[in-house]
Amino acid sequence: MTHPVRQIAGLEAAEHALAAGSARLLLVAEDASDARLRRLVDAARAAGVAVHPATPRVLTRLSTCSPPPPVLTLVGRDPVLDLPGLARSGGVVWLMTGVAYPGNVGMAIRTAEVSGADGIVIDADFDHAARRAALRASMRADRFMPVLWEPAGALLDASAGRHQVCALDEEGSCAPWELDLTGPRIFVVGGENGGIPGAVLERCDARVRVPMAGFIPCYNLQAAVSALAVERLRQLG
């Protein structure tokens, strides 16, 4: 079971997290000159904890307190897991397959991170420029959560027996709140036009449909992802 993902703010809290071995990443003011903060950064790097410099604007945007502290610490999630490590995780992994638009992918990456996922795997025919565009749209959430570009089957094979696989499908038989979304889960999202490929859909244990009531027959991909992510958080309480 993974530990809850959270952000902790401030120098003292960062020192405690590092000492406890729970710090996964430090976001540190790039213009910081405080000797105690420099010692923290040195200790983090020596322990193999990632340290990212941040401008005041970035710290303000990402901090949950005001004014922002000189350091924000990520705990609970390893942001550099590889595919086997992600497959062994005990929380949620998102799988996007056949998606076509970098903007939609970027917003889904951001939603996965904000909602506390362990990581996201993207099976898409994106070149380098398209991947960069998706990561920019995600608010560079890949710094704080694994974002892997791998075939869908590789994740499903590696995680077999570890996660229940749940498809976000317009032809699903139940609404998100009618299904237990807690525990280890892989949430599968298909492309904007073709949906989830049949070979992947056959490997899903459940199919969830977000209810719709308008003339347009489907939500934007990002909106549907958000609906499922928020319902999981509600169930977790």
Image: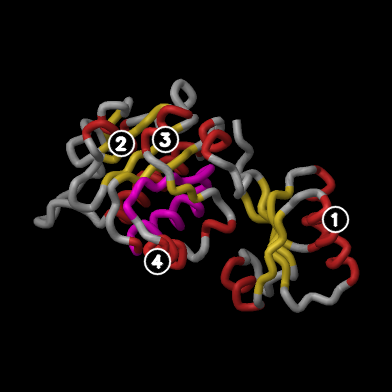
Give the magenta part as a residue range: 103-125
Q: CA distance from mark 3 to mark 4?
A: 27 Å
Q: Which mark is residue 129?
A: 4
Q: Residue 104: x and y, percent?
A: 33, 59
Q: Label 2 belongs to which residue?
A: 167
Residue that mark 1 sits on = 43
- Image point 43% across, 34% down: which residue? 155
Q: What amino acid is found at the position of numbered circle 2 in the picture?
A: Ala
Please rate how many residues cluster around mark 2, counting C-alpha atoms within 10 Å: few if below 14, some from 14 to 19, many from 20. many
CB atoms of marks 1 and 2 within 8 Å: no
The amino acid type found where label 3 is placed reads Ile
Q: Which mark is residue 186?
A: 3
Q: In the structure shown, which secondary structural element does the residue marked by tag 3 occupy? A: strand
**Few, some or many C-alpha atoms within 10 Å of disc 1 (few <14, some 14-19, many ≥20)?**
some
Q: Quadrant of residue 143?
A: bottom right
Query: Could you tell me the amino acid type at mark 1?
Result: Ala
Q: What residue appears at the point 53 percent right and 42 percent down from the top-left corner?
A: 118
For the residue pair 43 and 185, the one nearer the viewer reads as: 43
Which badge, 1 or 4, is on the more N-terminal residue?
A: 1
Q: CA distance from mark 4 to mark 2?
A: 28 Å
Which tag, 3 or 1, sits closer to the chain's start?
Answer: 1
Q: Is residue 57 left or right of residue 179?
A: right
Marks 1 and 4, how far apart in space?
Answer: 36 Å
| Percent position of residue 187, x then y | 38, 38
- Which of discs 1 and 2 lies nearer the camera? The answer is 1
Q: Nearer the viewer, residue 222 or 83?
A: 83
